[in-house]
Structures are given as structure tokens and as C-alpha cells.
């Protein structure tokens, strides 16, 4: 459902290709990224939390600089470094996702930590039934 909406031109959604609509959709997407990064930072250890905070700061800074070009876009003036700033923000987020994937991949499984998963379920079963 998201993919067709992302591929639909803005003028078909809002009646025109307005800058305000583009900025609104952009901000919703970035807030989703920041929420994911915040949850990832809280879920893993201290080193990943620090890395996540640095990544969040990079994403926020680069896209804030990108949003500073809104007056130039409204006036139809050139925006020379907008592409660079957007690429820095996108790269920081995608690098963060890659590091998250590696961190999750390297985590020990339940079987390696606590033994067999079935033993773990049997041990917690009496607690669940109230016995």
C-alpha cells in the first residue's frame, strides 16, 4: 500500500505539485525514520545507542539544512547544495540501518543464551497458568 502511494505524483494526490505537500510528506517520512532510530537506540547496548544518537543528529542537521532552501524553491531560484545535504541525510540513515542489521545478526540467539527454546517455554508455562 505504501509503495503505490510513494510512486504516485503529488499533483494526483493534492491536485497540484505544491511545495507544501512535498515538505509535509517529507517531514512525516523523516519522523518515521527518527522514531525507528530512537527505538533501535533504546533496544541495543550503549555503543549502539551512542552511534544512533550521532546518526540522528546527522539526519536532523542535514535535513534541517535542506529545509532551509524552501524560500529559494518557492521563488524558483537555484538550490546548489540541496542534493548534497539530502544525500548526507539518506546515507546516514541507510548506514544506520546496515549497522542495526549487523548488530542484530551478531546477537546470540535464545538457543545460544538460554538453551533450547522449547525448554524456555516449558519453564515459563507454570507461571502463565498460575500453578
Image (spheres, rainbow, N blue to C red):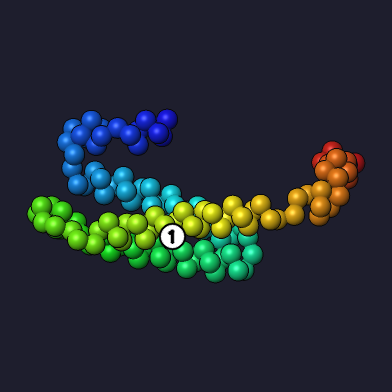
Residue 40 visible? The answer is no
- Relative vertical location of residue 25 with respect to residue 35 in this rendering, above or below: above
- Relative vertical location of residue 103 with respect to residue 53 in this rendering, above or below: above
- Relative vertical location of residue 37 with respect to residue 58 in this rendering, above or below: above
Say left or right for 15 vs 131. left
x and y, in percent, of residue 111 in the image: 81, 48
Q: Which quadrant: the N terminus?
A: top left
Q: Give the total number of marks visible in the rendering.
A: 1
- Residues 129 and 96: in front is 96
Say left or right for 31 vs 82. right
At x 42%, y 57%, the residue is 91
- Residues 41 and 83: in front is 83
- Relative vertical location of residue 55 with respect to residue 34 in this rendering, above or below: below
Would you identify the image quadrant in which residue 100 lies?
A: bottom right
At x 40%, y 65%, the residue is 58
Say left or right for 8 vs 126. left
Would you identify the image quadrant in which residue 89 lies?
A: bottom left
Q: Which quadrant: the C terminus?
A: top right
x and y, in percent, of residue 64 in the image: 30, 62
At x 18%, y 42%, the residue is 18
Residue 70 visible? The answer is yes
Label 1 neighbour load within 10 Å: few <14, some 14-19, many 20+: many
Say left or right for 42 vs 11. right
At x 35%, y 36%, the residue is 6
Would you identify the image quadrant in which residue 2 lies?
A: top left
x and y, in percent, of residue 120 in the image: 84, 45
Residue that label 1 marks:
92
x and y, in percent, of residue 63 in the image: 32, 59
Q: Secondary structure at mark 1?
A: helix
Amino acid at each position: 500500500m505504501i509503495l503505490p502511494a510513494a510512486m504516485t505524483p503529488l499533483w494526483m494526490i493534492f491536485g497540484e505539485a505544491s511545495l507544501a505537500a512535498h515538505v509535509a510528506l517529507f517531514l512525516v517520512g523523516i519522523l518515521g525514520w527518527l522514531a525507528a532510530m530512537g527505538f533501535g537506540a533504546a533496544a541495543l547496548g550503549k555503543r549502539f545507542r551512542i552511534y544512533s544518537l550521532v546518526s540522528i543528529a546527522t539526519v536532523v542537521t542535514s535535513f534541517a539544512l535542506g529545509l532551509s532552501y524552501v524560500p529559494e524553491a518557492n521563488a524558483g531560484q537555484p538550490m546548489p547544495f540541496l542534493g548534497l545535504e539530502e544525500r548526507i541525510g539518506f546515507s546516514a540513515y541507510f548506514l544506520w540501518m546496515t549497522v542495526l542489521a549487523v548488530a542484530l545478526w551478531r546477537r546470540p540467539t535464545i538457543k545460544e543464551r538460554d538453551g533450547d527454546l522449547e525448554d524456555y517455554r516449558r519453564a515459563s508455562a507454570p507461571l502463565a497458568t498460575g500453578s
